[in-house]
Image (cartoon, rainbow, N blue to C red):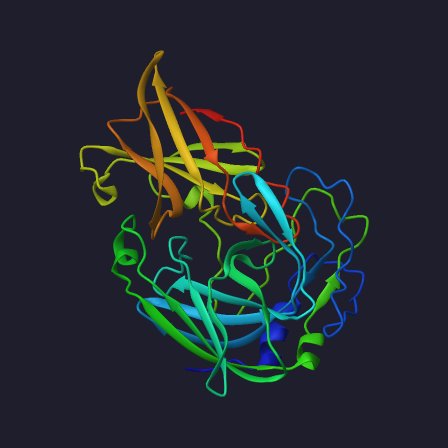
Amino acid sequence: MRRPSRRSFLAGVGAAGIGSVAGCLGFELQSGNREPPLVENRPDGVYYPTHTEGMLMGGMASDGGYSCALTYSFPHRFWTITGSDTTQVEVGSDDALHLMPFLWHSETGVVPSDVNPSVDVTRDGESVVSGLNPWAMLSQNMGFHFGDNVELPEQGEYDVTVTVGEGSSRRTGSLAETESAKFEFTIDYQRSELQAVPFTDIPEARQGTLGAVEPMEMDMVPVRQVPVVDDLPGMGHGTTESGDAVLAVQSLDDAARFDGSEDQQYLAVSPRTPYNRFPLPLMSLSATLSRDGETVFDDYLYEWMDPDLGVHYGAVVDGVESGDELTISIGTPPQVSRHEGYETAFLNMPDATLTL
């Protein structure tokens, strides 16, 4: 396994961002966090945060059909989600770093949303962190990943083991052929190296306005975006919106790989963030399909992972015809923790309609 140097990794991510910046902020790792205050009157949608940040690479490995890159940065605030309610997680006084295992399917590059990695950290054979399940998270420059703030007692080397169990049965193609996986890394936690991680202030006039920073570019790690609408398989029926999420609707003539038959059709909804096309997993969706005033389908849309559609929601239907009226209902918004800029979006999600 080739391990990228920290210097080369920082060089790869440091150029990504919003184009024009106001400079780098200092911060204190030992005595507390110095993230800028949150923007006042944040909009109910995706907005430019106060800053962007880079990260360090702890290594890369492959196992069980997956690849994993262990990355970390300085600890920072984020928001957890319960239903439609958010809870801000502040940086603890003993938090040493924000640990992020980036996981993806090696063949397709799809980031699995149906697994929950477990992280164990040891030092000289002694347990430091045991059975940590990092949050499924969404960040404007890092995309969909897993992460959490972690306490470490002192500087130095730590062994990190990331384990992944089997995924759900709602997978197609090579995504259904993965196995449980185990990845082992060693990180050298040094405050001086974390202090060198890019921490870039976004111009104040842009903070809190609708929009998003660009995803960072990482060597050897695939871009964690869903396909553009025109590249989705099947027949495209356009897009609709709910709670600032974009919902792309497709129909496929052959539903066999989605537990249907070749004679049935598959109705797929691909939710994504605006601007950056990040997937929105861990939602509860249902749909009603009406034709000439009659309901021809009314049921749940289940979360699936497909090499061509990526993470999406769908159901087998007897048929889709031009002029059908589709209503998509969001029972539960994405149960994904949020970095700054996403915490006010994808919460209040009313029904969305579309004429097919």
Residue at 27% in and 56% down = 176
| Quadrant including the N terminus | bottom left
Q: Can you give x and y, in whole percent of width and height, for residue 243 in the image?
A: 57, 34
Q: Where is residue 256 shown, x and y percent of the image?
A: 20, 41
Q: Is residue 98 left or right of residue 18?
A: left
> Where in the figure is residue 303, as x and y percent of width and height?
37, 43
Residue 271 higher or lower than 119, as above or below: above
Quarter of the rendering occupied by the C terminus = top left
Count of residue discs:
0
Relative placement, left or right, of 202 versus 242 is right
Give the residue drawn at x 43%, y 66%.
Answer: 118
Is residue 9 shown above or below 83? below
Q: Name the residue: 59% across, 58% down.
A: 215
Left or right of 270? Residue 138 is right
Which of the 4 image quadrants contains residue 273?
top right
Observer-nearest of 318 and 117: 117
| Depth check, front residue: 154 or 102 | 154
Quadrant in the picture for residue 164: bottom left
Note whether 199 is above or below 282 in the view shown: below
Which quadrant of the view contains residue 106?
A: bottom left
Whether residue 345 is situated above or below residue 35 in the rendered picture: above
Q: Position of residue 32 (x, y in %)?
A: 75, 68
Look at 18% across and 33% down and name the residue there.
263
Q: Residue furthest bottom?
A: 124
Left or right of 236 on screen, residue 33: right
